[in-house]
Amino acid sequence: MTPKKIIIFIPSIEGYGVEKNLYIITNFLAKHFSKIVLITSSRRYKDKFNNRISLLTPKSYFWRKGGRLRKYFICSLLLINYLLNNKNTLVFSFQANLYSTLISKLMCSKITIRLNSAPVGWSKNLLKKYIFKILFSFADRIIVNSLEFKKEIKNKFNINSTCIYNPLNKKEIFIKSKIKTKKIYSNKKSLKIINVGRLVEQKNQIILLKAVKYLAVEKKINLELILVGDGDMRPSLLKFITSNKLQNTIKIKKFNSNPFNLIAQADLFVLSSKFEGLPNVLLEAIALKKFVISTNCSTGPKEILMGGKAGLLCKTNNHIDLKNKILFYLKNKTKCKKMLLIAQKNLDRFDYNKNLNSYLKVINNFK
């Protein structure tokens, strides 16, 4: 039976890759279901959603600031209150999945959860692993965004899931890439490298900074690196740049809702993460005809880059291997162009309409 109401649960909207999929999927579902309620801690991103979507948020500004745990708490209360008063409701959780799963089962509601990043953290902690395994077994549907991810949670937690790739809107990316903006690189002849993502430990930009330091200082290569993002690692990254006198080589720019016209200015996109789910930004860079170097982290990059046939994969958390891959790109431009063509030809796996309709099918088949 198709649910009469759908709750989208995401306590903390922060504007990066997970949220990008949130906007796309939620707005698509709004075209097919008359009642969709979004539970989140803030109305800051209200304009990103179709006006048919109702936002349920806390009244006090207190809940909008601070860390995620505060937002998880208040949104969990909102979820409990809503489910108490609304039957035949499907919860579709994008975040805080343990909270939403436990609440949904206690309230006898159906729940689909979407896992966004590889279970690296939880699989190493035995207590966390046990808790995740038990609670996720209560979810009615689990959606992951890569086949590698699907295999990993099956092997580590014996949890079955459905893989739906991230929907890639190439037309929108291309249009936004053409919007005029200031030039972010100062030297036309330099190798222009870009990294877009939260400045947090997971994204591990420090190995990219170390690789660039070696190339610029030891090899005397003319290059420029731009990091686009915000996060708690920003001070330490800036300290590294300053202490190594790399201010003219490396710059950090605040994240904005349109990174595409920044990516369009680069020659090379580098992902330095320790773990991922299926990084949108790699798909977007390829759509903009940028060659990609990525860490071979769990999960997603290897799948996107077809095991290294469609881009270069380096060892995770290894700046030496990363600088070697950048050197390979510089010395093998013709070969890398052929790899980029392979990457572009295989973007159809992430077709916008096909993958959105897969979400619709999952919900329509709910019993």
Image (spheres, rainbow, N blue to C red):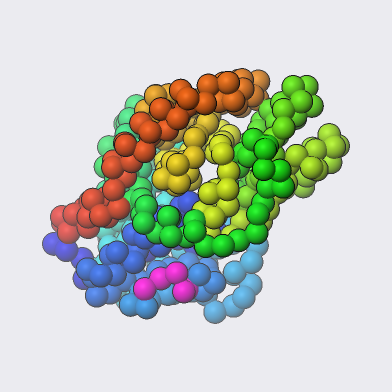
Q: Is residue 263 above or below residue 331?
A: below
Q: Quadrant of the C terminus?
A: bottom left
**Which region of the structure is painted magenta?**
46-50
Q: Position of residue 186 (x, y in %)?
A: 72, 47
Going by the picture, which residue comes out furthest to the front?
A: 189
Find residue 87 and report its image quarter: bottom left
Q: Residue at x 29, y 48 (%)?
A: 351
Find residue 208 and report its image quarter: top right
Q: Nearer the viewer, residue 262 or 16?
A: 262
The verdict on residue 47 being magenta is yes
Q: Position of residue 194 (x, y in %)?
A: 60, 42
Q: Nearer the viewer, residue 99 or 359?
A: 359
Q: Residue at x 40, y 62 (%)?
A: 23
Q: Quadrant of the N terminus?
A: bottom left
The verdict on residue 42 being magenta is no
In this rendering, does residue 247 appear at all? yes
- The reply, left or right, for residue 350 in relation to residue 214 is left
- The reply, left or right, for residue 165 in relation to residue 40 is left
Q: Main secondary structure of the magenta part?
A: helix
Q: Nearer the viewer, residue 71 or 332?
A: 332
Q: Residue at x 25, y 55 (%)?
A: 353
Q: Residue at x 28, y 65 (%)?
A: 29
In this rendering, does residue 230 appear at all? no
Q: Nearer the viewer, residue 285 or 199?
A: 285
Q: Position of residue 67 (x, y in %)?
A: 63, 58
Q: Is residue 131 above or below residue 79?
A: above
Q: Position of residue 133 (x, y in %)?
A: 38, 38
